[in-house]
Amino acid sequence: MNIALFKGILIKILYTLSKFSPRNHNKAVFGSYKNRFTDNAKYLYLHWQQTRFIRNIWISGDKALINTLNKQGMEAYHRRSIKGIYHALTAKYFFYNSYIGDVNQYFANGAIKVNLWHGSPLKRIEFDIVKGPLSKVYHPKKQSYNLLHHQEYTPPDIILSPSKLTDKIFCSAFKLSTEALLRSTSPRIDFHHRYPQQQKTKQDIFNHMNIKETPESHLLLYTPSWRDKYQDKNPYKTAFDWETLSNKLVKSNSLLLIRLHPNEIHLAKELEQYNNVLDISHWEDVYSILGSVDLLITDYSSLFIDALQYNVPVIFYRFDKEWYESQCRENYDFVEKISGIGPEYTQFDELLVALNLEEKEKIKSDQHLPPYSVCHPFHSAYEDAKQHFWEPSHKDAFEHIETYVNQSQSR
């Protein structure tokens, strides 16, 4: 028996036994992917730290993060510590961004598992993946894969879903019934509506870079999606003429922020040398600045769906579109229907022209449409996409989740 299979069997045994542990209805444990303090779990945790709605505990494998949270007066424990194991075994609620392993995959059985999910589905996810490297995880040739991928095969009891469109996807991708869906917006968005003082302004970011902000300065955010595998060693290095772009950013007094996926952070190191280009991949997340950027540049990342709520213009730069569509995960069918919210470019020269970094003063003086008007949210396709993903709701995510918790405690 190989080590991985033995570990999978051990996880199954401990997970099964954890069902018999008594659970405290007034206690919740939280965690996030790669031991980071980020995304929806982070913002629900921070909100309940303010309101004391329920005892909430952050679980992580990062000692430095735990120490930081403890110093700030918040309760956090290492996943393998005695207290970390104890609280995982006795908390009634698990809140996580991806899988139960964000908290502790050994001891989640018997708890109510609430998947806050870290993105909005554009690319096929989980059991809907039929192509690319991840397809073998969800459609394996050997049944032993469910032991090797325990947490991927463990469905949540509840998952947040903001619209009917995502209802259908989540039911299919996670193999859930509609009873497992909780209609709700995202804590990561609603947190900054509740606590606007936590947002970073455009001026804050320019000051951080020691760049003087002017009326012509623009703040651009580039957030490419994770590529399940690479065509080249670093696809982003060759996708741009970084020297030319940097020179134009400097000339227009603008700034480009780069945010790579957590699985690709190391690739950003080669891009740090250019002026007016700032790598923020190491930041916990981008939600504190999303409402301050002038333009979002992405490819297949679902971050643009969150940007819809801030009316941020969007450009899709899909420099490896043909390769990506043949080698990586497929998009859901609806994606082509909403692509009209912003222009798509596959060549850097086209993108550079669209960024319009040298014509801002002329546009302003002539009182034409604002820069990026071609992808501006003042048109029907943008508004239709917003309604697709974010159905109007009278309650924010915190109220929806708290209502669910209160109802579950009364059962």
Image (cartoon, helix red, strand yellow):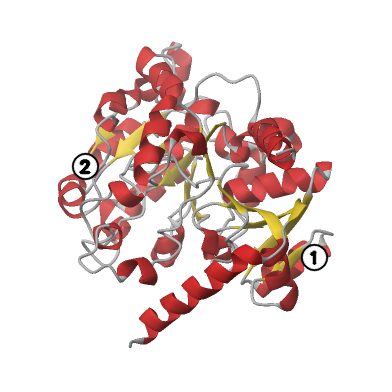
Q: Looking at the picture, how far across and down is residue 169, in whole percent?
A: 36, 37
Residue behind mark 2: 347
Q: Pointer 2: residues within 10 angstroms few (<14), some, or many (20+)?
A: some
Which residue is depicted at the point 50% across and 46% down? 117
- Quadrant in which residue 57 is drawn: bottom right
Tell me: 219 left or right of 84.
left
Residue 352 shows in the view: no
Which residue is depicted at the point 60% across and 53% down? 38
| Front disc: 1 or 2 | 1
Q: Looking at the picture, how far across and down is residue 17, in whole percent?
A: 58, 70
Q: Looking at the picture, how far across and down is residue 263, in whole percent?
A: 42, 62
Q: Is residue 205 above or below residue 339?
A: below
Residue behind mark 1: 70
Q: Is residue 391 above or below residue 117?
A: above
Quarter holding the C terminus is top right
How far separated are the C-alphas under marks 1 and 2?
48 Å
The amino acid type found where label 1 is placed reads Asn
Tell me: 81 left or right of 183.
right
Per the image, label 1 sits on a secondary structure element best described as: helix
Per the image, label 2 sits on a secondary structure element best described as: loop
Q: Which sits in the foreground, 118 or 183?
A: 183
Mark 1 / mark 2, whichever is N-terminal: 1
